[in-house]
Each structure stands twice: as structure tokens, then as C-alpha cells.
Image (cartoon, rainbow, N blue to C red):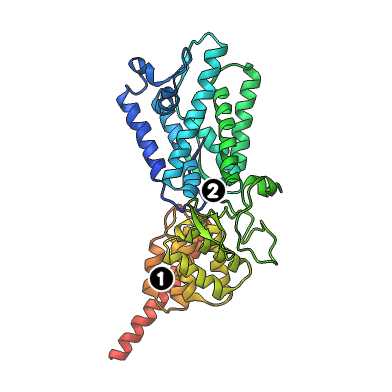
């Protein structure tokens, strides 16, 4: 069993709308009998009529706790990716639009071409639409999964959004191919994905989201299908080149627009750049080019705008490694401390590096010991052995300091 819990995509906007939608789904589930919705059929997608109101309400109705929880877990992950680029207002409008389109594409054909029996409910159609949007906007970003076997926790794994999308499309397509073309849960899921594709494309086309060349079309070499966007790339750096490693996520700019006048005094419209996106782009370019002083300055701007939380682990690790090569240990403490506070696979390694700096470069075994105490289980054998060595070294240094203090007093 694979349960998603997060993403490495930069989250420039706190997922207010995503949390609100999850709360609304949960609240409506509790208020309508927790799956016993007989008295609330008017809220689900009934196939014997055309009712636009139901196109939205049916996306907030669920048949069981497992139905609700499963959908909300995936909504959280894809909401992080998409709302992280758009902000809560535009994400809310997108979610509403996807719900309307998904409800319409499910209800209208059933009313027109069938006997109108049955109905549908649940957020999964909209979630599959969000999956389609996510794979078009951020195919190289990862979704973090817990994986389990027989309800025993086994570990975590990162899977690219493109792989997640291909897997679920294949599963739903094979089920439809096996059962035939008829209304079913897999068919509703495929219809949901088909709804998300035009929304994702049109928002890219009209610059309502800026993926900085890391969207699916640009990665496949079809940039001409997407409206051109402003870029600060240097002439010597090819467009679309990965600035730190091949898995760095897209760098979204703000989606709001403003009026301005160019040097020729001609009024036009450009997307307003989010300061986080600008600082992050400068930061990753500086790291890629190994320009340490510029990277330090850009990182300071990220901190100034409270944007470091949006920087993926890979970028911070690359930055910390370059500072290590340059022997900039004081500057290196900053990215390592940010990494150490994250619930990720690099947090314990970051704590080890902080403890090493405190011990060897700051001559502070007390601080090193406190840092090592913050490491969280489970530890790999390699990390556990490194921790033991550092603890021994810190304790030895503490004893030497104590002995030196005693001698000076005597």
C-alpha cells in the first residue's frame, strides 16, 4: 500500500484552500449521515436529470470513511503542488471549474444517452483532474509516499508525478478496456483526467501560471504551444536547463497581472513576478554556476521574504555542499539548519553535519551534543555509526575541557 503525504514541489502559498476543501468534504460527510445519504440524494450526481448544482455538491459527497480518507489524502498532495503555484483564490476557482466540468461530463451524457438510472458521488473525479494538471505543470516533481505491507510501516519513497499519472491512467484504462465502455468508477476517473488537461493547457497558454519552462510541453520541446514568458536566463545558459539537478521543480512566478508602460511608453500586460520565484531562480542559477557569494546573497533574499520553506531539499543540499568545498562553515550552518527541521530523509544527515561544524570548527562540544540529541529514529546503520563517533569525540573534548578547567583552578 502506498499513501502519499507530501511533495518536493516549492510551496510558495500556504494551502489554505486545500485545507478548507478537505474540511468542507469532512463536514458534509458528517452532516449527511456518513455515507447513509438516502435523504440527501439531491446532493449527489443523479443521472435522471441535468442539475448544475449537483455538479459541484456531488464532488463533496462520499460513501464511506475509506472513500473520504483516500480522496482527501490525494487531494492534500496535489493541492500542495497546484495551490503552491496559484495561491488560494485562483486554486479555489480552478477547483470549482474542475468540479463543474467533471460533473457535467458525467451527468449530461448519462441523461441523454442512457436510461438515467444510478448516480455518482465523490471527489475522485476532480482529484484525477488535479493529477492531470499536476503532471502537465510539474512532471519532474516527486510525490512522497509511505509504503506499507500488511499494515506494517516499511518506509518512504519518492515517485515522480509523471510516473504516478502514468500508473493511475494505465490502471483505470485497463479496467475500462476489460469491462467495456460504460459508466463506472474507472470511467469517471478517466473523464476527470480528460477534464484537467484543457484547464492545465489553457492556464499555461494564457500565462495564468508560470512554470518557468519546467512544464510538460516545454520539457518535451513544444514551447511554441505555450505563450512565451519573461526569463532572466543568461545568454550562455540554454533555456530549460536544470540549474541544480534534473529533479529540481519548476519555479512558479506570481499569477497576478499588472499594467505597466515599457520604455517606448506602450502600455501592455505582464505577469507580476513573485519575489520568492525571482530569488529562488537567482539562487539556483548561482549554485549551478558555483558562484558562492552570489548564492549566499540570493539565499539571504530567500530568508528575507520567508521563502526558504519553498526551496526543495536538492537545492539546499547542493548549496551546502558547495559551501563545504569553499570552507564557508558559518554560512553552511544556515541551509543545514533548515534541512534539519524538515521531515525528510536528509534531516538526520543535516544534524550530523551541524554537529560536526560545532565540534570541529566552533569548538563547542556542548552544542554538538545537543544537536545529536535531536536526531530522530529510525537511523540507518551508517548514520547511527557516524552519530556514535561524533558523540565519542564530543564527550572526549568535554572531558579534556573539564580537565583543563580543573588544572587551571588548582
Of residues 36 and 3, the one nearer the viewer is 36
Reply above or below: 185 against 323.
above
| Place of residue 134 in the rendered image (x, y in percent of width and height, measured from the top left) | 55, 42
Seen at 35% across and 27% down, the residue is 29
Q: Quadrant of residue 376?
A: bottom left
Q: Is residue 226 left or right of residue 61?
A: right
In this rendering, is residue 265 above or below 402? above
Q: Residues within 10 Å of mark 2 (few under 14, many from 20)?
A: many
Q: Are marks 1 and 2 in contact (CB under 8 Å)?
A: no
* Residue 172 visible in this rendered orientation of the protein: yes
**Residue at position x 46%, y 45% in the image:** 83
Q: Which mark is residue 66?
A: none
Left or right: where 196 falls relative to 178? left
Residue 311 at least partly seen: no
Q: Secondary structure at mark 2?
A: loop
At 61% from the left edge and 35% from the top edge, which residue is drawn?
Answer: 167
Toward which corner of the image does residue 187 lie, by quadrant? top right
Graded by Cα atoms within 10 Å as few (under 14), some (14 to 19) or many (20 or more), the crowding at tag 1 reads many
Q: Which residue position holds label 1?
A: 368
- State how far apart marks 1 and 2 are (Cα): 44 Å
Q: Residue 8 at what x, y percent from top left? A: 52, 51
The quarter of the image holding the C terminus is: bottom left
Provide the residue designation for mark 2: 209
Q: Nearer the viewer, residue 37 or 316?
A: 37
Q: Residue at x 49, y 71 (%)?
A: 332
Check the image and name the residue furthest to the front. Answer: 265
Left or right: 26 as drawn, with respect to 198: left
Amino acid at each position: 500500500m502506498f499513501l502519499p503525504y507530501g511533495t518536493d514541489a516549492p510551496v510558495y502559498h500556504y494551502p489554505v484552500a486545500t485545507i478548507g476543501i478537505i474540511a468542507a468534504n469532512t463536514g458534509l460527510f458528517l452532516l449527511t449521515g456518513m455515507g447513509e445519504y438516502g435523504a440527501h440524494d439531491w446532493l449527489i450526481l443523479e443521472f435522471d436529470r441535468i442539475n448544475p448544482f449537483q455538479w459541484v455538491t456531488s464532488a463533496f459527497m462520499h460513501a464511506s470513511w475509506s472513500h473520504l480518507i483516500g480522496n482527501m489524502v490525494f487531494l492534500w498532495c496535489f493541492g500542495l503542488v497546484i495551490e503552491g503555484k496559484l495561491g488560494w483564490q485562483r486554486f479555489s476557482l480552478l477547483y470549482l471549474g474542475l468540479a463543474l466540468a467533471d460533473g457535467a461530463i458525467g451527468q449530461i451524457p448519462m441523461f441523454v444517452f442512457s436510461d438515467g438510472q444510478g448516480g455518482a458521488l465523490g471527489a475522485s473525479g476532480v482529484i484525477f483532474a488535479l493529477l492531470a494538471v499536476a503532471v502537465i505543470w510539474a512532471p519532474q516533481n516527486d510525490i512522497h509516499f509511505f509504503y506499507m505491507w500488511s499494515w506494517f510501516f516499511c518506509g518512504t519513497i519518492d515517485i515522480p508525478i509523471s510516473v504516478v499519472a502514468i500508473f493511475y491512467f494505465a490502471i483505470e484504462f485497463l479496467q475500462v478496456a476489460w469491462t467495456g465502455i460504460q459508466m463506472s468508477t474507472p470511467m469517471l476517473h478517466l473523464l476527470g483526467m480528460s477534464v484537467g488537461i484543457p484547464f492545465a493547457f489553457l492556464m499555461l497558454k494564457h500565462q495564468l501560471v508560470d512554470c518557468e519552462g519546467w512544464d510538460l510541453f516545454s520539457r518535451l520541446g513544444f514551447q511554441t504551444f505555450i505563450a512565451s514568458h519573461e526569463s532572466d536566463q543568461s545568454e550562455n545558459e540554454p533555456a530549460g536547463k536544470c540549474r541544480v539537478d534534473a529533479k529540481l521543480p519548476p519555479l512558479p512566478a506570481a499569477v497576478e497581472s499588472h499594467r505597466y508602460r515599457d520604455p517606448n511608453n506602450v502600455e501592455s500586460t505582464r505577469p507580476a513576478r513573485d519575489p520568492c520565484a525571482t530569488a529562488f531562480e537567482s539562487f539556483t542559477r548561482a549554485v549551478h554556476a558555483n558562484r558562492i557569494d552570489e548564492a549566499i546573497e540570493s539565499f539571504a533574499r530567500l530568508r528575507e521574504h520567508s521563502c526558504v520553506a519553498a526551496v526543495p531539499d536538492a537545492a539546499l543540499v547542493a548549496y551546502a555542499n558547495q559551501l563545504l568545498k569553499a570552507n564557508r562553515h558559518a554560512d553552511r550552518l544556515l541551509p543545514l539548519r533548515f534541512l534539519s527541521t524538515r521531515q525528510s530523509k536528509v534531516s538526520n544527515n543535516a544534524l550530523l553535519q551541524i554537529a560536526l561544524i560545532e565540534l570541529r570548527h566552533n569548538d563547542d562540544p556542548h552544542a554538538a551534543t545537543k544537536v545529536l540529541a535531536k536526531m530522530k529514529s529510525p537511523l540507518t546503520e551508517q548514520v547511527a555509526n557516524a552519530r556514535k563517533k561524533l558523540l565519542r569525540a564530543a564527550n572526549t573534548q568535554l572531558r579534556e575541557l573539564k580537565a583543563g578547567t580543573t588544572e587551571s583552578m588548582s
